[in-house]
Structure formats: structure tokens, C-alpha cells
Image (tube, rainbow, N blue to C red):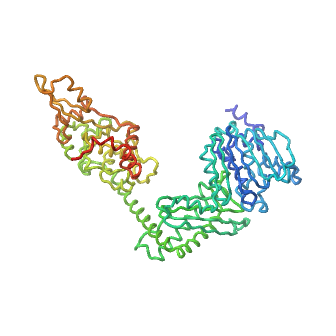
Amino acid sequence: MSSLKDSYSNESITSLKPVEAIRFRPGVMLGSADINGCIHAAFEILSNSVDEARAGFGDTINFTIHADNSITVEDFGRGIPLDWNKNEERYNFELLYTEFYSGGKYFDNNYSYSLGLNGLGAMACQCSSEWFDVESRRDKKVYRMHFEKGLPASELEITKAKKHQRTGTIQTWKPDLEVFTEIEIPQATIVDMLKTQAVVNAGLTINFTDERDGFTETYLYPEGILGYVNELAQDEAMTTPFQFSGEGRGRDRADKDEYSVKADIAFCFSNMTQELKYFHNSSYLEHGGSPDKAVKSAFVAAFDKELKARNRYTAKEAKLTFGDIQDSLILVTNSFSTQTSYENQTKKAINNKFIQEFLADLIKTNLQIWFIEHKPDADKIIEQVLINKRSREQSESQRITVKKKLMEKTDVTNKVKKFVDCRSKDPERRELFICEGDSALGSLLTARDPEYQALMPIRGKILNIQKASLQSVFASDIIMDLIRVMGCGIEVRGKKLPKDIPQFDEERLKFNKVIITADMDVDGSHIVCLVTTMIYKLCPQLIERGYLYYAMTPLFEITDRTGKKPETLYAFSDQERDRIIEGKDPKKITIQRSKGLGENDAEMMAKFITPGTRRFIRITSAEAEEMEKWFDLFMGNDVAPRKQYIEAHGHEFMDELDIS
């Protein structure tokens, strides 16, 4: 303890220089030291070129990723001032690329609305690079500077520009693997970033070249966010895309400076696509902040007022929520301000109070106009929002019922209809047979061992979960009863279930094996597919952890009279049948298709479910995925692939058609 105390002295306190700070702790300025930080560094350089274009200097940006993962951003703006700065008595290249809080965006006269305001982006990118080159063309001269590991590695080179050479800036750098854990930025990430900047900066052309695979593409949205909303709707919009704009001045607090805000907002409604995207000063706000709060409060207020004016609420009906509107809404906001309060340097959200108030007022005012001037569209959406609202309320009520149903214990006083339990309470011994119909139940009932084998009959074919919504699943008595009997709850991959629905918990599973038992015919195979798909969708861990089985039942019943006493044998495939009868007198062999489960006597059925003589196939995740793929093809909602498959392969199954 004393040695630790002695080691902490006045000399223990150190100060990192700006370059060292970024290289040692890149996450502070760039969000993280992984690929996301590397991406953010590239975005900082791109955003400076975007700011130039927004200020009216240049309408094209070229973005290139080279084969070694170095990056070049070229714009045709005014060119960055890199020469001697009399006011600061230093070179501008030092201020811009090696110092904190240096830049030309602190006053409104240079950039009225800017993505970068803190003077950190270019410096953070340069300092986190293995090497960094900047070429600036301005004042009929070309200025070049080279950096390595965050420090100047050359003198400022100044040459005369070529005749008619355009002004602008070229910045090329290679992210440093000593700073980032990974530097190979995925192409899709860059595409999304560049496309976004083209969307929110109408008329800006961005050319992308990826020399790693030769990919090239140009992004240009002459209509800006209105064109993007049209693209998102994909010709399936319920209403005509609508855009409105506004400008204002205000302050976040009485003692704060006044600043300017302007915004464009575009929206439409669709039953196929739902999307909310917020952009501020050309940056995508992943977490929203002020614009998100403004949109939600304004849309609820405007729609609530309109519903009341039209007397569309029933007596004592609850007020709508934003979710009821969002279920059918595609909306993009694109705002700019001369002062912006980001939650952090990565610019994922803003928290300006005035921006929130300004956007909320702008949206409410224009929605009121939209209700009047676009009455046919408004009438249609009022009806849709009410449908969304009442469906939600019904689902919430249904979820409460589902929760109660799934949490109920299956005891003598509260049994699942037709479920036959076993005596043992030890989950390590218990087995659950899911059987097809009441006839199979009767046969299994006399053949099973009541000590540890339980039975759950399926009354007819269960819901095709491949086509069904969760609401339909929760409304299915068969599925809910089966989940309740198993006791393990529900898990739906890729979807967040409501908190009041019991989540999957292996510890609550009441059985060591869950066995699907069905006839070896077309209907039986269909039952197996339906049940397997249901469990794969609602309880995938049952399959992954080896709890799900399929009980094989014979295809053929073979009577062999070649010995002293007739012997009954069973074949589970054509190959097994042929192997059994090989070399035997055909006159003393009788072969018949096996009877259905319900027609088997207890002794015969016992052979198929008793350890030692039974044949169980454990269903694996790979088999379930393959089954789901084919099940989706033949039973899913998408008709076109099914039609194509039948046209291509239908002739292969002609012999199996049941045509009389």
C-alpha cells in the first residue's frame, strides 16, 4: 500500500499535447478507436468540403478510396488558407491540422450554416493518420503540406497555379493502424455517407470511386429531401410527398446569444415503409435529439386537434400516440443553425431548445395547412391513423391476455384442453409428444409410459407462422396452448417483444425432449413443417440446444411368413423395405402401406415411442433453416418465386401427383 502511495507524486501529473491526445485517446474526438472512429475521421474531412459547397463555392466533390485504404477528398471551393497568419503569428496549416479549436467557422461571416463548428475535425483526422497530404489551390497559387504521425513532415511548398486551374482543396491520408484497430472502411458505409450528403444538399454532385474493386457511382438529388422521400416510398405512397420550409431566429435561454435556424421538412404516408430521418447541418442525427422531440410532439398535437375537430374519437376513447402515426409515416427533416449544441463530438444528436421549439411550431402550422389544402390525402390518413391506434389498443389488450395465459400453471384445476400430463415432475425425465389429432392421441395414450411421457394433440393444422403477424400468433389458441405447456416462454429473433410477454427461459422448460409425431404422408409432413417452423420462429433455442425431435413412423408394414411363425417387420423407407425382402420368397411376403397413427394398436405404437425400439431424429438448426427456406418458398407471402420454381421444376414431380 505504501509503495502505491509513494508513486503518486507531483511528478505523476502529465499533460498530453494535442497531437498526442488524439493518437493516445482517439475515442474522445472520434467516438471510438475501432472502424467507427476511422469512418468518423473521413466524415470530418468530407463535411468541410460540404460546408464549402453549401456556402456557394463549388458544386462537386470527389471521394476516392485507394487500394491501400488511403482516402482522397477533393472539392472545388475556395481552397484552405495554409500560409502565414498575421493575427495568430503562426502558419495556418499548424492551426488547422495540429491545434485544438482552430478554424474559420466561429463567426457567421464565413459559414452561415456549417456542419463543423468546433475546429476539431481536420485536426483529429490528420493526427490519427499514418500520413496526411493537403493541397490547396487559391490566390493563383498551389499550397502543399505533408504530415506524418500527426506532425509536419515538410516545409509548406508554394508554387504557381496552372492557367485556368480551378480553386479547391485535395486532402489525402491513410488512417493509422497504431491509432485504429481497423482501417478498411466498408464500401456500403461510404455509399450511405455520400448518398446522405447528396440528399441533404440539393444539387451537390458527389462522385465516389473505390479502387479496391473498381466500383464507381455518382450521387445527385436535385430535389433534395423531397426526392429522397419519393425514393423511400418506392411508388407505394398512400399520399403525395409534401415539403415545407421555414426560417427563424431565437435563443436557447434568455441570457444566451440569438442565432438563426432554417429547415426543410418532407413527408408522406405509406403502409409499406416507415422511416424517420433527421439531419442537421448536413449531419445525420442517428439519435435525433431536438428534431425528434419536435416531430413527435407536433404530429401528435396536430392530429389530435384534427381528430377532435372531426369528432372522430368515440366516447371515452384514449388520445392517440405518435406510434399510431409513425406506423405509416415517412419523414425527413433537414435543418441548419448558426449555433448548434451537439451532445458530443460525434454529432449523433443535438439538444438546442430553440431548434426544438422552432421545428415544432413549423410542423404544427404546416400540418394544419396540409389538412385543409390536401383534404383527400388527409381524409385517407385520418382513417389509417385511427386503424393503427385501435389495432394497437387491441394488441395491448391481447398481450395482457397472452401474458396471463402463458403464465398460468397447468394443474388439475386449470388444464390446457386435451393435454395429457405425465406423473413425473422432473424436467430431465419428462418427454412431450406433439401428435396429430385426437385419433393419434388415443393410440399414443394406451402405448405411452404415463410416468414420464406427456401428450399434446394438435387439433387440425396449426397457423402458418410464415405468413402470420405476431398479433395472429398471439390469437392462436393452438400455438399459445403449446407454448404454455412447454413453459419456456417466447423469443422472436429480430423483433423486440413487449415486456409483458414472457421471454424465453430454458430453465422454465418442463421437458427434456419435445417430439413431433405425425403420419408419414403428405398431411403428416405438412404438420411436421408447420410445427418445426413455429418452434424455430418462437423458440429457436429449443432447436439450437437439442430439445426438438421427430419420431419416425414406418412407411411399410411387412408380414414375413417364411419362418415357423409369421413375423411383422417395419420399413421406414423404400430402401429399408427392399433390404428386408431381398432374397425371400415373394409368395410368403405381404407388404402394405403402414396405417395412420390412429389405427395402430398399443403394442405396435409402443415400439415407435419406447426407448430401445423407437427411432427419433433430432432436428438441428441447419435442418430447421433449410426447412424454413422451402416452407417460405411454398407457403410464404411472395408468390413470384413460388411460380418461378413450379415452372422450372414442376415436371419433376408429375409422378407424385394424386390425380384420379
Count of numbered tags: 0
Q: Is residue 641 left or right of residue 243?
A: left
Quadrant the N terminus occupies = top right
44 or 250: nearer the eye? Answer: 44
Q: Measuring from the top left, give residue 192's x and y in whole percent.
A: 60, 51
Q: Is residue 39 left or right of residue 585?
A: right
Query: Is residue 108 visible in the rendered structure shown here?
Result: yes
Q: Measuring from the top left, give residue 178's x and y in whole percent.
A: 69, 36
Q: Residue at x 38, y 44 (%)?
A: 648
Query: Is residue 539 visible in the rendered structure shown here?
Result: no
Q: Is residue 651 placed above or below 59 in the rendered structure?
A: above
74 or 603: nearer the eye? Answer: 74
Q: Is residue 67 placed above or below 328 in the rendered structure?
A: above
Q: Is residue 269 left or right of residue 122?
A: left
Q: Is residue 334 placed above or below 378 in the rendered structure?
A: above
Q: Is residue 593 placed above or below 467 in the rendered structure?
A: above
Q: Is residue 488 left or right of residue 164?
A: left
Q: Quadrant of residue 72?
A: top right
Q: Measuring from the top left, give residue 360's x and y in whole percent.
A: 60, 68
91 or 209: nearer the eye? Answer: 209
Residue pushed farthest left?
A: 564
Q: Quadrant of residue 453?
A: top left
Q: Measuring from the top left, give residue 387's x and y in whole percent.
A: 42, 66
